[in-house]
Amino acid sequence: MTHPRTSPATPGADTAADPLTDHAADPLTDHATGTGPRPAADPSDPAPGTTSPGTTTLAAATPAELRDHVTAGLDDPARGWLRRALDEAAAHPGTHGPISVWELRIAEAGRRCGPEQGDAARVLILHAARADAEALSRVYYQGTGAERRAVLYALPHLVPGPEGLPLVEDALRTNDTRLLTAAVGSYAARHLDAHQWRHAVLKCLFTGVPVDAVADLDRRAEGDTELARMLTDYAAERTAAGRTVPADLHRVLTLTDPPATPSAPAADHG
């Protein structure tokens, strides 16, 4: 967890330069500093190009609901390990020595709980440790992709203000679809300004992240004429290049002005 490693580009992502961000996403650059490698994918992660089956639960559940969901999917040894890890984090939430004990447990979670429950276990440990913005930043910038996702999923419950926005912004600069999915949850919906939020929506379309992952999409897109213009321009660019227009684009465009937006052509899928 404490050693940055290089991660490959996400398979399945559009390999063309992203025209919708201020600078190209570089999977080898740590955007906290602008230099150095980003962490590699956790070996316990789900297969590349997929998301964990618990993504919806992770994004929307309260800590109590999440714990019920996770423990139901674990065998007895893993359930016992998680119970001890949560008790340990609650009893010793601060930093002890060079690294806190709960950070070590986060690093173990995938191996102990398996790939399907590892993300949720990490989120629960962060909650139990009552991690603040500083601790979450440390875990994020020093962590694997799986640990970064856990931080993003935990933000809405642990950081009431905008202090966690740099982590969301960093995730939105990547082409890692699992990290992007975690980044566009309710914390982003509450704290990203209009410009950043529009680019987050377009980044989802560019990388193939379903817009269902974008929290509060209907409310924020309603009446957003600038988002409509950006979507229309992006669709025109793809059409001119002989590429398909993502079906989700038409869905979001309809949200910006339902009465005035034509329906998507039947052949448009992407």
Image (cartoon, rainbow, N blue to C red):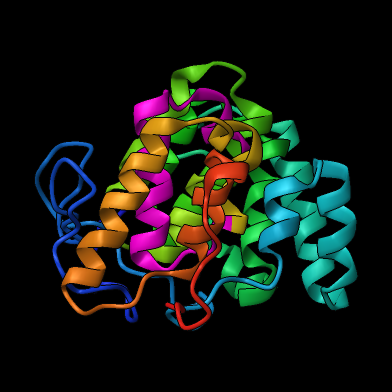
Foreground pick, 260 / 123: 260
Measured along the vertical axis of the image, is residue 6 above or below residue 190? below
Magenta highlight on residue 194: yes
Q: Which residue is painted at 42% across and 64% down in the image?
A: 177
Q: Which residue is painted at 72% across and 52% down in the image?
A: 85
Q: Which residue is painted at 42% across and 35% down in the image?
A: 197
Chief secondary structure of the magenta portion? helix
Looking at the image, residue 117 sits to the left or right of residue 23; the answer is: right
Looking at the rendered image, the quarter that the N terminus falls into is bottom left
Looking at the image, residue 55 sits to the left or right of residue 5; the answer is: right
Foreground pick, 177 / 123: 177
Magenta highlight on residue 248: no
Q: Which residues are magenta?
A: 186-211
For the view shown, which residue lies furthest in the left direction? 35
Q: Is residue 201 visible?
A: yes
Looking at the rendered image, the quarter that the C terminus falls into is bottom left
Q: In the figure, residue 52 lies in which quadrant? A: bottom right
Measured along the vertical axis of the image, is residue 26 above or below residue 258? below
Measured along the vertical axis of the image, is residue 190 above or below residue 102? above
